[in-house]
Amino acid sequence: AADAAGAGAAAPAPSSDAKPSLLDVARAMSFYLVSFTLALPLFAAMMVMFPFTYVSDKYRRYALSFVNDVWATISTLPFVKVRVVGREHLPAVDAPAVYVANHASYMDIYSLFHLRRPFKFISKVSNFIIPIIGWSMYMTGHIALKRTDRKSQMKTLKDCRELLQNDCPVLFFPEGTRSKDGVMADFKKGAFSVAAKERAPVVPVTIVGASQRMRSGREWAMSAGEIVLVVHPPIASDDAQELCDESYKVIKESLVAYS
C-alpha cells in the first residue's frame, strides 16, 4: 500500500514527546471513572434490550449500537472535543459498508462512535471478558479475534462478509494493531478483500489528534484538545489491492494535511 501513496513516507508522528503532567494523569483517571460509571446503568439497559434486539435486528442491533454511541459521546464530552469533517460522505445507517481507519490510540474507538453508525469492529478475545465493557461489546455484536490463530482470522473475515450480506457495516483498522509511535503502518488486505468480494464500498476515515490526546502505551495520561474524524468519499472497486492502495493514500494525505 505504501508504494501507491507516493514516495512511501509514513505519516508524521506526533511532534511532541513531552512528559505528561499531573493534570494529564488526573484527566485520564477522571475519564476512566466517568466512562465506567456511565457504563453501569447503560449496561443494565442493554441487558433488558438484548433479547428483543437479537430477535428483531440480529445483525445491526441498532438499538444496542445507539447505546454504545451515547456512552462514548458522554464519556468524551468533558475531556476532549471530537469533531467530524465530511459527515455527508457517510453511507446510510442501513447500508453495508466497510469503514477503515488509522489506529494509534485507545481513544480511536471512542471517537469513531461519534459517527453514529452501527458498525461492528474486530477486537482481540481478551477484551470481551472485561467486565461490563467487554460484555457490552459481545451483546452489541462486535467480533472477537484470536490474533495468532489462523482459523480465528478466517472465521472473522467470514463473519464480516455475513454482516455485510445482511446490511450491517463493519469497521477495520487495517494496520492490524495500534501504532506505538503515531506513524501509520502499511495496510493489510483483509478488510479490502472482504469489501471486494461483497461489492461493498470502502469508507476511509482519518483519525487526527487521538494519539496526541492519549499516546499508545500512555493510557494513564490524557491531554486536552481536539480529535478530528475526516470521513472521505466511499471507494468502490472489485479489486482489493486498488481499494487498499487508495484508502492508504487518502488517509495518509489527510493526516499530513491536518498535522
Image (cartoon, rainbow, N blue to C red):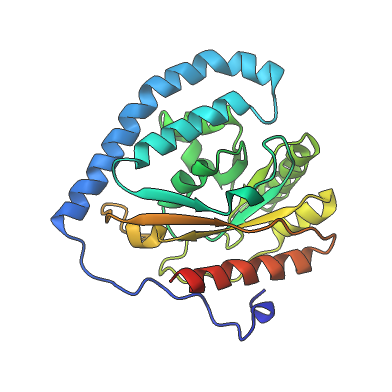
Question: Relative to 70, is 13 above or below?
Answer: below
Residue at image location 61% in from the left, 36% down from the top? 118
The quadrant in which the N terminus is found is: bottom right
Q: How many marks?
A: 0
List x then y, in percent, for residue 87. Answer: 58, 49
Furthest residue toward bottom = 7
> As drawn, which residue projects farthest toward the front?
88
The reply, left or right, for residue 42 in relation to residue 198 is left
Q: Is residue 65 or residue 158 the one in the foreground?
A: 65
Q: Hey, which quadrant is residue 39 in on the image?
A: top left
Q: Identify which residue is drawn at 50% across, 75% down.
A: 11
User: Where 164 falls versus 235 (above or below)?
Assistant: above
Of 61 and 190, which appears nearest the observer? 61
Which residue occupies 62% across, 68% down?
250
In the rendered image, the vertical position of residue 183 relative to residue 48, given as above or below: below
Q: Nearer the viewer, residue 142 or 45?
A: 45
Whether residue 214 is visible, yes or no, is: no
Q: Quadrant of residue 216?
A: bottom left
Residue at 28% over, 53% down: 222
Taking the image as drawn, is residue 218 in sight? yes
**Image position of 12 (left or right of 120):** left
Classify the position of the C terminus by image quarter. Answer: bottom left
Where residue 173 appears, as percent x and y from the top left, is: 58, 56
Q: Would residue 108 be found to the left or right of residue 250 on screen?
A: left
Residue 113 in picture, x, y percent from top left: 51, 41
